[in-house]
Amino acid sequence: MNRPSASNRAVRSVLLVLFALFFMFPLYAMADFSTRNLIQGGRTLDAWKSLVADDTLYSAITISLALAAFTVVVMLAVLVPTMIWVRLRAPWAKGMVDFLCLLPLTIPALVIVVGMRGVYEWVTYFFGESTLTLTFVYVVLVLPYANRAIDAALSAIDLQTLSEAARSLGAGWTTTIVRIVVPNIWSGILSAAFISIAVVLGEYTIASLSGYQNLQVVIVQIGKSDGPTSVAASLATLLFGFVLLSLLSLLTRRRRHGVQGQGVEDSAVVAALSTPQLQGGA
Amino acid sequence: MTSPSTSIATSSASRSGLAVDLTGLTRVYGSVRALDGLTLHIEPGEMVALLGPSGCGKTTALRILAGLDEATSGSVWVGGKDLTGVSANKRDMGMVFQAYSLFPHLTVLDNVAFGLKLRGEGAGQRKARASEMLELVGLAEHRDKYASQLSGGQQQRVALARALAIRPSVLLLDEPLSALDAKVRVQLREEIRRVQMEVGTTTLFVTHDQEEALAVADRVGVMNKGRLEQLAAPADLYTHPATPFVAGFVGLNNKVPAEVSQGTALVLGSRVPVLEGSIDAGPGVAMVRPESVTVTPDAGGTDRVVNVEFLGPFSRVHLTTGDGVALVTQMSSSQARAFGAGNPVTVGVEPTGVLVVAPS
């Protein structure tokens, strides 16, 4: 292992500072704008206070958080066993599953909304008109990201040998998955979960087109009358995503004993960090 | 084609362990018959090695015994119980895999205790048993490490301890040494044999390495194209190969033209006894072991040394006879110093039994 030379380190630091400034500047601008008192001048935290005080905004925040949580739970419950099963018992189906999981990326949100209309007549029939029914679309929407993250983690372990070893020691399928496979793809599961949260918190198009009020829809509405509050809400979402992803990085690094999958986590963090901005811009 | 050996498991039959019976096992994958009516009996406490080239069905047989693969037809019996339809996790068999199979998120101790935990043993008992097993494979001081901190050989020893911790009815070893380097392989195979003798568990050991199989097993079964060609004690297998395939697969062999009559064969000018399974009379091909070929320097000889291959403690001398038959013989390197490429020599054959097959 070579130690980086002094000039190398200097170039690195300069680049780091430049990129940090580039990314921090819009955030700084948002922070500045959201704390401005537009009428009397000076500083005020009114915009930040109304995140909680404004009933519409507050309920939108809780709904989006609940949507994120439900989406993650349903996505993991569907995807993890399926992907393990496909790898172990139906490898011929892997290409098909990957293709299906990638589809949502290629289909425009408008088409998804129109296409879902028929399905949603049944969904609302059974579950009512709640915004939380968006969970079903969002599970589909996060499939490409979640699939990638879990797939990378599964590729990093010898799934077949590990599960056969567990079974030969007396573990049934559930025990094998819960006690042996999941702990070893934990980093991938965390990545999938956090990326999904970031995607759901940043989702605007589908909610708006389907006529539901989630966080982003409300932010846009408020933006039309109260700029600072909408910017405060956007910044809060971004910061929340940032905290989640830092947590992911920290958790996975501490959990693993330098075993494997470090590259997997890092790439997932990068991918996840880039999503809220993209989605927020929609 | 199996020849019952007279010396079946004399060393380990007395110990605890269950008998294993595979009867008429056939496994068909699409158009491939991976196993073709395999019948195999393993005595309680015996260690049987299945030996054969890749694709001969030996691993399929082991996986069917483990319950990780299903036979198309045939049945699996252990200790008089029919396990054919029983799933892998209820078979109570310990298995060591070719690939490293330790659970990366558990310590060495927790890996070994995993099977005991599933069996509902208390924490204290688990720890004691796991420690005892680690002691057995000489890794007690590594109990708190993770798989990534161990060498390949150590990982396989932990895997062995883990497989034995559950007091399995049968121990299954699926090429456990293939991923290791040469020196560790030899050490570990001796260790596996020592541990197996100590514990007395009936063991099926699958390998493609004949030296490994001959060195550790009570009996070796040679497999070819999904069938068992011969099952015999290592020495019997080597000196009395039952089929041309076994003669060719186990050990190096010279193929020398021979003439059989009245139970003996004329090979390289000497009369030698023929083994069971040979042709009755007429011209054939004798399978002669390198160590049975004799070579003496002879200024007037018509045979020649082609070259001498130095292999450390011993050397292989390649020869050609006056009739153009290529031969290989083996001798200690100090003896081999007497020979050089092009030297005139006379070759002969020691009067040990040879297998003579029809010329192809």
Image (cartoon, coloured by chain):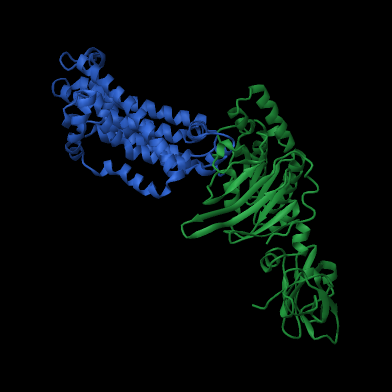
Chain colours: A blue, B green
Q: Which residue corresponds to the image point at 32% horizontal and 46% vertical from the top-left?
A: A99
Name the one closer to the observer, B133 or A259.
Answer: B133
Q: Which residue corresponds to the image point at 28% horizontal and 44% vertical from the top-left?
A: A103
Name the one closer to the observer, A2 or B194.
Answer: B194
Residue B110 shows in this picture:
no
Residue A244: % across, % down: 38, 27
Please, is residue B20 above or below residue B213 in the view?
A: above
Most extreme residue toward the left is: A225
Quarter of the image holding residue A198?
A: top left
Q: Which residue corresponds to the image point at 47% horizontal and 36% vertical from the top-left?
A: A185
Residue B7 shows in this picture:
yes
Residue B141: % across, % down: 71, 32
* Image quarter in which the N terminus of chain A is found: top right
Residue B40: % across, % down: 66, 52
* Image quarter in which the C terminus of chain A is found: top left
Q: Which residue corresponds to the image point at 70% horizontal and 50% vertical from the top-left?
A: B48
Instruction: Tell whether B45 sits left or right of B53.
Output: right
Please, is residue B210 above or below residue A165 in the view?
A: below
Name the one closer to the observer, A207 or B214.
Answer: B214
Instruction: Tell whether A194 sits left or right of B98.
Output: left
Instruction: Tell whether B4 sits left or right of A46.
Output: right
Instruction: Tell whether B275 sits left or right of A205.
Output: right
Quarter of the image holding residue B332?
A: bottom right
Residue A73: % across, % down: 36, 28
Please, is residue B136 above or below residue A93 in the view?
A: above
Q: How many marks?
A: 0
